[in-house]
Amino acid sequence: MSLRPAPLLLFCALLVPAAASAQRVSIPVDVGVGPAAFAFFGPVFDDQPIHTGLKLSVEAVLDKEWLKKNQRRVPQRYRKYAKSLDEVRISPSILIPDALIISPKLRNTGMYGATWKPLSLGVPLTSSPARLSLGAGLLLTYVYMHSDTLPNTHFLRPGAEVGIDLELQLSKSFLLGVGWESAFYVPQELGGLGLPERLRDGIFHVGQAYLQLHFRFPYTVRL
């Protein structure tokens, strides 16, 4: 299970008793970064199919071993629930972008911007060392698009995404991930912030393929 931010009562409850009996606890942190390719389907895709960027992630990874070792930090009424989990991932902040779009004008169109994912849920289908998971989430994206053939556009829209991710654990501290996400936005016309007259004339669906290098290291906090 992967959550951003961490709304589960179980993990909020980890922090509640900290004031009275805070101890230094080491939590595995996963930092992922890698190249991404974006396809803005519609007129932008017809003009230039692929745009480039970076896929980012920062998560605390609480696996079964960590939960068992630190079960005293979990309130008793939640311990049975915690034992049933293989892994929980928590993003420390919704302010960390999920992706950066950095695509210079190589043909007709360039664009720069970022996507934030304030809420997401991932369901693993398999476990490590080859972890395949399905995910969904809510998005907010801003992109400035400048073009020789299309109207310059400030794309600013909320949306929702679905995706699939395959993560290969090559060692305890290094993993490799590949995946695809399809983001669906409130349609926006090119050159303005309104709705397009026809769906196919605006920006609605953005696909993202990515490769991520994951580095894991212990981080000490007080719980």
Image (cartoon, rainbow, N blue to C red):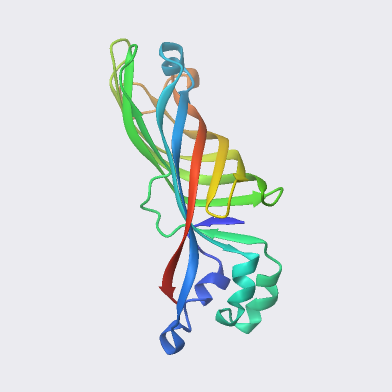
59 vs 134, left or right, is left
Residue 186 position in % (x across, y down): 45, 34
Quarter of the image where the N terminus is located: bottom right
From the viewer's perspective, is residue 189 above or below residue 170? above
Judge by depth and name the residue closer to the eye, 77 or 127.
Answer: 127
Judge by depth and name the residue closer to the eye, 160 or 99.
Answer: 99
Residue 90 position in % (x across, y down): 50, 60
Residue name at image x 49 percent, y 67 percent: 27
Picture quadrant where residue 181 is located: top right
From the viewer's perspective, is residue 190 above or below residue 98? above
Residue sticking out furthest to the bottom: 20
162 vs 106, left or right, is right
Judge by depth and name the residue closer to the eye, 94 or 169.
Answer: 169
Judge by depth and name the residue closer to the eye, 177 or 5.
Answer: 177
188 vs 79, left or right, is left
From the viewer's perspective, is residue 122 above or below residue 22? above
Q: Is residue 223 visible?
A: no
Residue sticking out furthest to the front: 171
Residue 91 position in % (x across, y down): 46, 57
From the viewer's perspective, is residue 222 above or below residue 64? below
Residue name at image x 61 percent, y 78 percent: 71
Residue 134 position in % (x across, y down): 64, 44
Q: How many labels does the image show?
A: 0
Picture quadrant where residue 176 is located: top right
Q: Can residue 180 be seen in this view?
A: yes
